[in-house]
Image: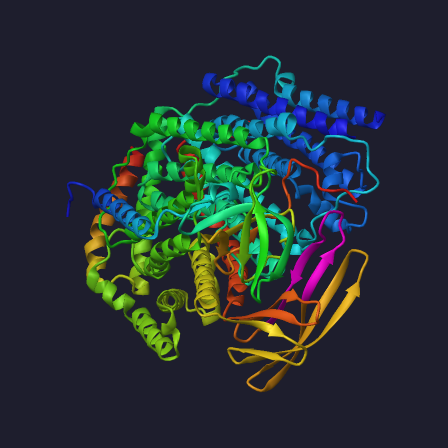
């Protein structure tokens, strides 16, 4: 079956090459049937990639160890669902997943748009196919998942720390995000290639961008949650280059999501938007490169692999291609509208964009500097936490504040006096909150206090928006409060969905501030019967138990927890020693986490060292508000779903606009 | 093994058919030209977008005023120019 | 109120200047990152560095009581000189002989004294060109 898999990938490569060549020719010479043929080739490429993926998946499910890749990442005793997730557990398989999602998205995008924007789609096809050529080339020539060998008796198995539902879902979500950015990129390039200066490409890809962006966000949260509960050092984000690899395109995409709104409302920033979408996509390629090439010193770091130079070439081609196109079409894209006032919603979006891009670029520098330093000076450096923390505060805190300012300011021009009245309540509420928190001791961390105060401002501003909007609707239609609220959101899904997403980001900020600026830690060696106290909790070490399973020797320390005298029950935390061949067994910490659902606080018990004499060295954290981070993920999803929800009225309006202008959209 | 070859061959055939389909369906079409966006259409598109923008801006202004985000003075200052813009955009499109 | 030049350009220019200024200020004060060195390059270096190496021999001691002692060699040079390291603080689970680690610290009297808690180990190959041991 490996030959079928390999053949299917070759077919994909061939189809995509055809789609690039024939598609470009058809678009420039306006050959209708050839354009259709190229489009069909792209759709067929999804089919053949699906065949290749099915072969690999079947190999895993049947434990076919004649496939080297299957043998390297799975074994007989692995449970079914993890056998499937081992598909993307390694280099070749994850590249195949990337290609599968890419061709799937591409097929869907060109199919959905087959009767509209035909002059755009004829260019979108070769661009998407070109990206697919890159990945399928890598899979066919450099990193094939279908290498065969004499089958060993059993496979190497999947790293136990990866056998976790969060780690299982983290890559697919991330890829849905990374790859999803290719579609707005292709449409933007298509618009440039066809010489269009209108916003059709933005309208066509709005949902794609939002879905990709949401997936990227959720994917990162899943990864963070895995790091928190499974890796167990007490944190959820380490500014590791591979983590940053996903954050950078996310920030660029966030900026893009906002700036397209300006183009929609005012016709401005056309050049900025194409630059941003190209940046977001190139960063997502860069992120994929970082994670695979072994070029960075990272805890995720994988040994030097052959794929690095190819990927770098791929990225360079993408950057050169988009830059050339943008520069070529620059004269066309100049807009005549000007920013009227520095105090307007456009201006606030502009500041938001500047801050987001600044943060994105400083993270990029932090990731690239060690690589450049090694290449240029021969010595490498390590860029640590303090660098990232500093810039996160400098750019992130104003961004947080802006999230509350934006919704309250009108488009075009807002008068300062009017602003004073609008901002009065949120300002007062945040001031009071700040003072109260200061009294309660939050002054121990100034950035934390600022974060909390700004968060209060934003929540008050958004709450005010909802109240005002509902009240205005009631005045119009005399519905009940709940009815007016529902119809307010229903009629302005993008706006109010966006506000809900802002609330999610605020919750995220509060969770991060609480758990990093106001956490407490205590550590020490305990014999049975001894305790450690932290932040009101008392943790008493009771006993050690051992359990032997076929996979691992599990040692657990049982502790009793009480808070301010009240008994809260017991917890377990320990270490698993996995029985694998090699000089040392693989050990993982199984931390104990006790969540207080009322306050969002976690008691985090790490058994750092289990000594032979029966004592255990514990490290115990109390992390306030950390669960708001995970809650934020759910709110984030809710907001996105609201914003994505199809709006029949808007669809009609857009259809009228594009039909009327006589776009080549009629069916054939 | 032979199953693999069979499936592979089937895949290849399906792909070739799909790619050739437009030519098979219309061996001798009346026109093989792709619809192009003429300059006149581009102009209309730009005007249509401007019109939609002007109308949306008016609607937003009304909504902002009703909800209290803009006070009466700012509202009065802005409504005139916006209405003029919208009227101009509508007129340009009708031409 | 017609403006000759869009304030947007001014704002963008000023913001970029501000960002650059902040950035340059920070890096000149806090430095451009900690130098990353291999055990063979360590001799004679003063100041805090980030040491990257592979653990050789058997570690002794307790990182929470007196310090964990072990030796590191260059990852890519099996015959190179080794360096003695003393480490206090949390030890990652993956730490073992033969694993690659990164530690911050400085050389003092021939021994590399680590800053507590700064050890990072690399995940055993996820995307690796070499095959992990089969059962």
Q: Is residue A579 magenta?
A: yes
**Residue A4 appears left or right of B75:** right
In the image, A481 versus A345, the foreground residue is A345
Q: How is the image coloured?
A: rainbow
- In the rendered image, the quadrant that contains the N terminus of chain A is top right
Residue A348, compared with residue A142, is above or below; it is: below
Residue A504, compared with residue A649, is above or below; it is: below
In the image, A18 versus A568, the foreground residue is A568
Residue sitting at 76 percent across and 26 percent down?
A3
In the image, A133 versus A522, the foreground residue is A522
Residue sitting at 44 percent across and 49 percent down?
C49
Residue A510 image offset from top left, x and y in percent: 44, 66
In the picture as drawn, the residue positioned furthest to the bottom comes out as A565
The reply to whether residue C112 is in sight is yes
Question: Quarter-wise, where is residue B44 in the image?
Answer: top left
Magenta segment, prevailing SS (helix, strand or loop): strand
In the picture as drawn, the residue positioned furthest to the top comes out as B28
The reply to whether residue A57 is in sight is no
Residue A87 image offset from top left, x and y in percent: 69, 42
**Residue A287 appears left or right of C96:** left
In the image, A201 versus A549, the foreground residue is A549
Question: Quarter-wise, where is residue A224 in the image?
Answer: bottom right
Q: Is residue C97 magenta?
A: no
Residue A511 image offset from top left, x and y in percent: 48, 65
- In the rendered image, the quadrant that contains the C terminus of chain A is top right
Residue A472 image offset from top left, x and y in percent: 36, 66
Residue sitting at 62 percent across and 53 percent down?
C95
Question: Quarter-wise, where is residue A322 in the image?
Answer: top left
**Residue A361 appears left or right of A117:** left
Q: Which residues are magenta?
A: A574-595
**Residue A500 appears left or right of B83:** right
């Amino acid at each position: 079956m490996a030959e079928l898999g390999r053949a299917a990938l070759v077919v994909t490569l061939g189809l995509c090459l055809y789609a690039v060549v024939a598609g470009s020719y058809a678009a420039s010479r306006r050959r209708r049937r050839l354009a259709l043929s190229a489009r069909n080739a792209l759709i067929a490429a999804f089919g053949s990639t699906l065949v290749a993926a099915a072969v690999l998946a079947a190999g895993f499910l049947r434990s076919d160890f004649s496939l080297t890749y299957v043998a390297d990442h799975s074994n007989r005793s692995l449970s079914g669902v993890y056998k499937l997730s081992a598909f993307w557990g390694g280099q070749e398989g994850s590249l195949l997943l990337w290609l599968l999602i890419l061709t799937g998205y591409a097929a869907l995008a060109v199919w959905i748009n087959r009767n509209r924007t035909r002059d755009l789609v004829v260019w979108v096809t070769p661009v998407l196919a070109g990206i697919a050529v890159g990945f399928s080339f890598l899979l066919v020539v450099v990193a094939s998942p279908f290498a065969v060998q004499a089958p060993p008796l059993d496979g190497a198995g999947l790293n136990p720390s990866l056998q976790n539902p969060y780690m299982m879902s983290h890559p697919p979500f991330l890829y849905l995000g990374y790859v999803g950015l290719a579609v707005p990129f292709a449409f933007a390039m298509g618009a440039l290639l066809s010489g269009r200066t209108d916003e059709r490409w933005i309208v066509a890809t709005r949902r794609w961008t939002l879905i990709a962006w949401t997936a990227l966000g959720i994917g990162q949260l899943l990864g963070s949650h895995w790091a928190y509960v499974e890796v167990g050092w007490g944190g959820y984000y380490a500014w590791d280059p591979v983590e940053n690899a996903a954050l950078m395109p996310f920030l660029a995409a966030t900026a893009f999501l906002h700036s397209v709104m300006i183009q929609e409302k005012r016709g401005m920033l056309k050049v900025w938007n194409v630059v941003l979408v190209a940046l977001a996509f190139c960063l997502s390629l860069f992120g994929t490169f970082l994670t695979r090439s072994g070029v960075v010193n990272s805890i995720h770091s994988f040994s030097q692999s052959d794929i690095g130079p190819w990927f770098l070439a791929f990225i360079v081609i993408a950057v050169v291609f988009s830059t050339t196109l943008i520069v070529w079409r620059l004269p066309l894209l100049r807009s005549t509208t000007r920013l009227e006032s520095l105090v307007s919603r456009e201006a606030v979006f502009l500041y938001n964009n500047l801050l987001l891009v600044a943060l994105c670029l400083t993270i990029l520098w932090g990731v690239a500097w060690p690589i450049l330093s090694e290449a240029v000076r021969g010595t490498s450096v390590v860029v640590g936490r303090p660098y990232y923390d500093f810039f996160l505060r400098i750019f992130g805190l104003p961004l947080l504040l802006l999230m509350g300012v934006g919704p309250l300011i009108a488009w075009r021009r807002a008068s300062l006096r009017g602003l004073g009245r609008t901002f009065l309540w949120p300002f007062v509420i945040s001031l009071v909150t700040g003072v109260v928190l200061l009294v309660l001791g939050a002054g121990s961390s100034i950035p934390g206090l600022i974060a909390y105060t700004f968060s209060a401002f934003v929540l008050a501003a958004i709450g005010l928006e909802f109240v005002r909007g509902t009240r205005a609707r009631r005045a119009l239609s005399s519905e009940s409060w709940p009815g007016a609220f529902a119809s307010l959101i229903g009629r302005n899904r993008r706006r109010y969905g966006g506000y809900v997403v802002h609330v999610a980001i605020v919750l995220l900020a509060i969770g991060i501030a609480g758990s990093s600026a106001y956490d407490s830690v205590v550590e020490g060696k305990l014999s049975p019967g001894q305790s450690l106290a932290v932040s009101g909790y008392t943790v008493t070490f009771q006993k050690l138990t051992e359990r032997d399973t076929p996979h691992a020797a599990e040692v657990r320390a049982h502790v009793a927890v009480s808070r301010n005298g009240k008994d809260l029950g017991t917890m377990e935390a320990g270490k698993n020693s996995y029985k694998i061949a090699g000089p040392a067994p693989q050990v993982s910490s199984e931390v104990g986490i006790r969540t207080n659902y009322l306050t969002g606080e976690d008691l985090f018990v790490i058994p750092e060292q289990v000594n032979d004499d029966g004592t255990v060295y514990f490290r115990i954290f109390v992390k306030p508000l950390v669960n708001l981070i995970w809650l934020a993920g759910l709110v984030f999803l809710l907001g996105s779903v609201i914003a994505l929800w199809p709006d029949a009225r808007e669809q009609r309006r857009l259809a009228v606009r594009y039909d009327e202008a006589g776009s080549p959209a009629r069916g054939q | 093994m032979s199953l693999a070859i069979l499936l592979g061959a089937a895949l290849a055939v399906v792909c070739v058919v799909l790619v050739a389909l437009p030519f098979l369906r219309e061996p001798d079409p009346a026109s093989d030209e792709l619809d192009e966006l003429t300059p006149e259409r581009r102009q209309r598109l730009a005007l249509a977008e401007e019109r939609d923008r002007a109308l949306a801006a008016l609607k937003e202004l009304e909504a902002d005023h009703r909800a209290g985000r803009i006070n009466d003075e700012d509202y009065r200052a802005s409504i005139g120019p916006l209405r003029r813009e919208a009227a101009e955009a509508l007129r340009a499109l009708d031409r | 109120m017609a403006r000759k030049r869009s304030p947007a350009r001014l704002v963008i220019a000023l913001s970029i200047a501000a960002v650059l200024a902040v950035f340059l200020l920070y890096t000149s004060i806090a430095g451009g990152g900690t130098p990353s060195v291999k055990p063979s390059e360590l001799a004679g270096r003063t100041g805090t560095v980030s040491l990257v190496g592979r653990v050789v021999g058997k570690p002794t001691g307790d990182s929470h009581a007196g310090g964990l002692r072990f030796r590191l060699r260059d990852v890519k040079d099996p015959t190179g000189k080794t360096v003695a390291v003393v480490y206090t603080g949390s030890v990652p689970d993956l730490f073992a002989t033969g694993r690659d680690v990164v530690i911050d610290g400085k050389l003092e009297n021939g021994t590399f004294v680590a800053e507590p808690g700064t050890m990072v180990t690399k995940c055993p190959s996820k995307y690796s060109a070499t095959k992990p041991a089969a059962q």
